[in-house]
Amino acid sequence: MQVRERLSMGKRYIFRHNSFRCTKCYACEIACQQWHGIPAGTIKLRRVSEEVRGTFPNVLRIFHSVSCLHCSDAPCLDACPENAITKREEDGIVTVDSNKCTGCRTCMDVCPIGIPQFNAAGIMQICDMCVDRLAVGKNPICSEACPTKALNFDLV
């Protein structure tokens, strides 16, 4: 996307992840689960994964911390038949209205990176960038918990 296009869309929040600084400690994933009161062994709004390249003895391990990307053209918005998914105009955060979500999983089918997850009640859950923390001037809990500062939060 061209810089001019990005600026014309207004400011939006994004996560930046430096996979070379990440040690796969899971601090971001665990902090997120605890902050949101998500029981262990259920859904994960942020997921840490590992990519392995090469063969022994020349192996490279790369770690990724991924959550909803809050896409500028989020396909889940148009796909949701209940209009349960919206995008906040002021900052680009994609949110889910749990009262409208019927658990049809259409959003999961169109997400390019397979992020939507469904809780025990069948309601779709995604990272909301800790809007409660943003409202009081704090960064999302996952970026604050990262000991190597591999996960950062910015307004672009």
Image: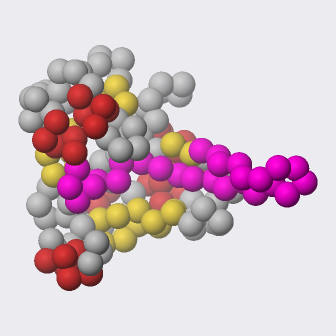
Where residue 8 sits, quadrant-wise, is bottom left
Q: Residue pushed farthest front?
A: 55
Q: Position of residue 112 (x, y in %)?
A: 35, 44
Name the residue: 11% across, 60% down: 89
Name the residue: 59% across, 44% down: 49
Name the residue: 25% across, 34% down: 107
Please say if 58 is above or below 67. Answer: below
Q: Viewer-proximal residue, 56 or 84?
A: 56
The magenta segment is 49-74
Q: Residue pushed farthest top?
A: 121
Where residue 149 sits, quadrant-wise, is bottom right
Specify whether residue 126 is in view.
no
Please say if 97 is above or below 143. Answer: above
| Drawn side of residue 21 relative to residue 111, left or right | right
Q: Position of residue 143 (x, y in %)?
A: 48, 60
Q: Viewer-proximal residue, 43 or 113?
A: 113
**Quarter of the figure with the N terminus:** bottom left
Q: Position of residue 71 (x, y in %)?
A: 27, 55
